Image (tube, rainbow, N blue to C red):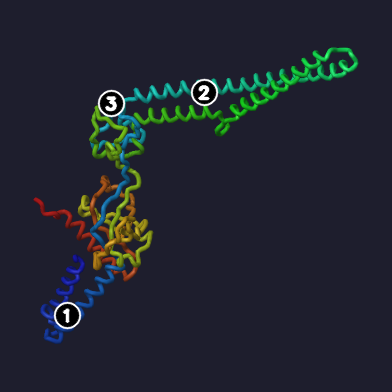
Amino acid sequence: MTVALLILGFYALFMWLVFYKFQWLKFNIAWGVVSFWVGFHVLFLLIVFLRFYTPYTIDGHVIRQTIQIAPRLPHPTVLQEVYVSQNQKVKKGDQLYQFDPTLYAAQLAESEANLANAQQNALILEENVVLARDSLNQARANEQFANEQVNRYSNLVPRGGAKQETLDQWNAQLAGAEAQVAEAEANVKKAQLAVDAKFDGVNAQVAAAQSQVDQAQYYLDQTTIYAPEDGVIISQQARPGLVVGGFRVGSIAAFVADANPYFLATFYQEHLKFVEPGQPVEVALDIYPGQIFNGKVRAIWEGTGQGQIIPRGRVPEFLFMSPQGRFAVEIVLDDDPALKRYPAGAHGAAAIYTGGGGNWVAVLRRVNMRLYSWVNFIVPFDV
């Protein structure tokens, strides 16, 4: 609208100079029709060129990555200390909150005791294998001796060198020895299976106990919350005495990261016909009246909520002639020493220069952007 008014103003000034100031031409009905027709087409073409070759929007905002600070504790736990205040700048690793660690320290101690017990049991299982093998060797020795005695008396009895009762006794001892060997072999196999029960090369009971220790250590560590990166705490509402954990799923503060801010502006879909990543951009932020910041197009978010149908049990209802959804363009601003503050949600206007339409089109848009920026000195009128 600003550019259109400027064009009309310059054209009206030109007509006034031609027909009234210098009177190069005499104004009449014919010249009036021609002037209107030419002015209309000039305005129309300029607006078309501006819309497509230098897309412009006043719907842009600074976007910063946010992290929801939420405790990850399985049991109701009391908040003991709060080390940050509202709108406080913090560095990565700074301590933010401290919850009561008593319960989780006790669980860790219990898990470590269970781990020590499991490790001892693993040693006992290995010793059981050694004992079972010794018993098997003894049983096999007894079996071999009984078998030798049976063979010996089997030769003596037919020749009268020994009694049948003695042979019968050794046959019974041999049967008993064979049973002992079978039992000992089963015990060795059972003991070996217990030793071979491993997970990733570690005894299964030891691995399970170690996982409990790791879990207990994790929750104990979660009783202290640290800053995930450099940023600022927003909406800090937590106070000592707050109970979290269990069924609580909400966060206790919002953390706005310092890294990788960008400017997100929305444009009518048809205006992005010639827009591509890497093209230069000018941004005028409302919090910096009279200043223009340079940047580049990083990406075009070619999608809106109108292109999504959420699964549900009802047939979708379509409203014809509904307003088209705008596409968002992600813009990265160049480093500028004048940009001392870059708060999330800061509003502004943006213009993309595609390089088409000639230099005069870009000049008009640059004038438009600077007018917007300077008008921010007096808009809004809330004095």
160 relative position to 357: left or right: right
Callout 2 secondary element: helix
Element type at marker 1? helix
Q: Specify whether 330 is left or right of 128.
A: left
Of tags 3 and 2, which is closer to the observer?
A: 2
Q: Identify residue for label 3.
A: 80
Q: Secondary structure at mark 3?
A: strand
- Asked which quadrant contains residue 204, the reply is top right
Residue where numbered disc 1 is placed: 36
Q: Identify the mark nearer the N-term, 3 or 1.
A: 1
The image shows residue 212, relative to residue 17, as above or below, that is above
At label 3, the amino acid type is Gln
Where residue 120 sits: x, y (%)?
54, 20
Is the C-beta separation of discs 2 and 1 under 8 Å?
A: no
| Viewer-closest of 78 and 23 | 78
Residue 118, numbered label: 2
Q: Is residue 17 left or right of residue 266?
A: left
Of residues 228 and 261, the one drawn nearer to the viewer in this rendering: 228
Could you tell me which residue is drawn at 47 percent across and 22 percent down? Answer: 114
Which amino acid, by three-letter code, is at mark 2? Ala
Q: Mark 2 or mark 1: which comes first in sequence?
A: 1
Q: Quadrant of the N terminus?
A: bottom left
**Label 3 or label 2, whichever comes before in sequence order:** 3
Cα–Cα gap, marks 3 and 2 = 35 Å
Q: Which mark is residue 306?
A: none
**Gap between marks 2 and 1, in whole Å?**
95 Å
10 Å neighbourhood of mark 3: few (<14), some, or many (≥20)? some
